Image (cartoon, rainbow, N blue to C red):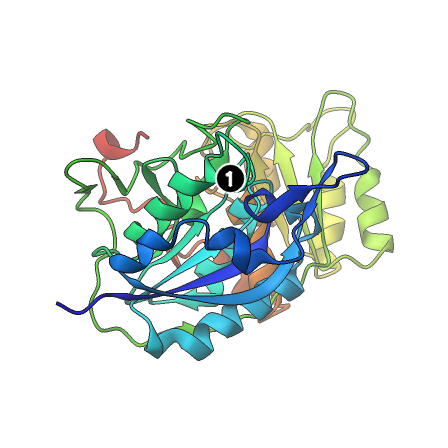
Amino acid sequence: MRRPKICLLFCGGTIGMVKNAKTGAMQPASNVSEIIQIFPEIQKYMQLDFKMIVNIDSSDMSPQIWTKLATAIHQLYDKYDGFVVAHGTDTMAYTASALSYALQNLSKPIVFTGSLIPLNEIGSDGRNNLTYACLTATQDIAEICIVIGNRIIRANRAKKYHESIVAVFHSPNFPYLGELGRPIMLNEWRKKRRKRALKFAPKFDSNISVLKIFPGFDPYIIENVLRRNAHGLILESFGPGNVPIQDNSLIPNIEKAIKAGIPVIIANQMEKGVTNLTAYQGGYQALKAGAISSRDMTIEATVTKLMWALGHTRKIPEIAKIMDTDLAGEIADPNFGKANQTA
């Protein structure tokens, strides 16, 4: 039986870090291949090739590196049965979400993984995470996912939960794609392998602002966004997308932004939330002013989707259509059923 061919793309993060002998601080290793080859036994089950993309702390991740990573996968796409991306956990949900837009219509899995403890330290979670991620890359899955521990999570639904080896990521608004156990369980709502024409569109415009609304928020802060010529604005608002409409009303400033050609996305601050701009007057007035709902997307999926949309058009009606369209499973399918909308 042919061993699956899997490509491991390395982007850095704790999984490839070592301690600095002088300072004791974690820093990227100088020879990543030696760290990854700590467990050569995995080669018995698959042909695993390595490719270095970058070796950085994930807080230094950027849209330029997203494009570099997406391009590398596109160039290698036909040579492998699946891909694994080793990446720091802090910005993993952003990178994985971004790639779900840059590489649409997949016919094979792209699996992100990382660790909280470096591979070469005792008690590292990296060994199991990397093993599980490689195993997931051989399964009947055809989408971008995150595997930390034994859970398989749709990438653009994932959020970093806390610094715990057993529960680093969770999926507030969508159920897990599967779990790695005995046996491996894959849920029916996952996207499955079949022949599809890959859509490769790795353009991002990161010139956006994200503002969190709070009691006492000065609406004129939005004017600073206009002055700095931002191309897009996301407002994390109250409840299902409510904004202040009394003395410190944001509505005139939202109208100014729209008139200046800057799309305004209304997101919400809830961990398990859905933006509904018709539920209350505050959201409805923002909708009438031209704001766009983030629906049930995570903030990571919303940020990267707006960057992706702006990378392809600056026309607000087209951006609104993109933001309201489910490109890669980031928005709830109304036919999925409310009973399944739990993680």
Residue 300, how many percent across, how many down? 55, 45
Q: Which quarter shows the C terminus? A: top left
* 267 shown above or below 61: above
In the depicted structure, whether residue 267 falls above or below residue 322: above
Q: Give me the residue at 48% from left, 29% from top.
A: 123
Q: Looking at the picture, does residue 55 appear above or below residue 171?
A: below
Which residue is depicted at the point 58% across and 49% down? 16
Between residue 321 and residue 152, name the one nearer to us: 152
The quarter of the rendered structure image containing the N terminus is: bottom left
| Residue assigned mark 1 | 115
Crowding at dot 1, Cα within 10 Å, few <14 / some 14-19 / many 20+, comes out as many
Q: Residue at x 54, y 25 (%)?
A: 239
Q: Which element is circle 1 on? A: loop
**Residue 11 image point, x, y percent:** 57, 57
The image shows residue 53 at horizontal and vertical percentages of 58, 65
Residue 175 visible, this angle: yes
Image location of residue 287, percent across then percent down:
56, 43
146 with respect to 264 (left or right): left
* Residue 137 in which image quadrant: bottom left
Across the whole image, how many numbered discs are drawn on residues? 1
Residue found at the very far top of the displayed protein: 215
Q: Quadrant of residue 192?
A: bottom left
Three-letter amino acid code at the position of disc 1: Ser
Residue 39 in the figure: left or right of residue 231 = left
In the image shown, does 111 or 325 lie closer to the viewer?
111
The residue nearer to you, when weighing 38 against 214, is 38
Q: Residue at x 64, y 61 (%)?
A: 63
Is any atom of residue 293 visible in this view?
no
Q: Is residue 175 left or right of residue 102?
A: left
